[in-house]
Amino acid sequence: MADKLLCVTFSLSVSNKMCSLVDLICNRAGYKLFLGDFKFPNINWNTGNTAGSSQSKLINTLQKFFLQHVNTPTRARGSATPHLLDLIITDDSFVENTDYAAPLGKSDHSILHVFCNLKPVKYQFLDKFGFSKGDNEGLCNEVQLIDWNEKLLPYSDNIDQMWQNFKCKLEKKYRNVYA
């Protein structure tokens, strides 16, 4: 399971630059999520058929690596033919559901609610200490009371263990003073 999500939004017409960008993103690690107004009214997203050569290149790239999750038209204006322009494209099947809602304000594009099944990774944040607000003199006094020879001599043959022990003792002291 990937631990990163690369989310790319589009609101532009197809071009070679866009195809190059999609190719570049395909080689990145993690889940990929493309969404937005792709402005491709001539692409039939159910069959992959299109009239334009640059659009064909994009379709070929996307069909090799990705899933397209929107299957009903998302843009309708007056009596014009509705088009499937707003897309949600992923490299894995982590999209569980897509709900369609009425356009917002004067927009003629549907609102898409995307429900993804992703397990976020919890990161442990390091403590940040307010050194400017602490008792620096108190810390110096506390550290001077430690018999460092006694604490570190048992690790004299292993510098890494010595460092870890020193660091642990020092952190304990400044947690008391700066927390």
Image (cartoon, rainbow, N blue to C red):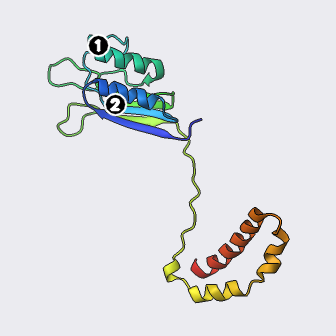
Choose between 144 and 134: the one closer to the eye: 144
Residue 133's x, y, as percent? Answer: 50, 82
Quadrant in which the N terminus appears: top right
Q: Which residue is mark 1?
A: 53
The part of the image, by quadrant, that contains residue 2 is top right
- Which numbered disc, 2 or 1, marks the residue that appears first in the sequence? 1
Quadrant in which the C terminus appears: bottom right
The part of the image, by quadrant, that contains residue 90 is top left
Farthest residue in the right direction? 154
Amino acid type shown at disc 1: Ser
Residue 145's x, y, as percent? Answer: 73, 87
- At 51% from the left and 28% from the top, the residue drawn is 92
* Few, some or many residues within 10 Å of mark 2 (<14, 14–19, 20+): some
Is 92 on the left or on the right of 156, as rendered? left
Structural distance between the alpha carbons of marks 2 and 1:
30 Å
Residue 173's x, y, as percent? Answer: 67, 79
- At 72% from the left and 66% from the top, the residue drawn is 164
Is 91 on the left or on the right of 78, as rendered? right
Under tag 2, what secondary structure?
strand
Choose between 110 and 22: the one closer to the eye: 22
Residue 176's x, y, as percent? Answer: 64, 80
Residue 100, numbered circle: 2
**Where 167 falls versus 13 (above or below)?**
below
**Where 18 falls versus 8 (above or below)?**
above
- At 23% from the left and 39% from the top, the residue drawn is 104
Under tag 1, what secondary structure?
helix
Q: Is residue 166 visible to us here?
A: yes
Callout in the foreground (2, 1): 1
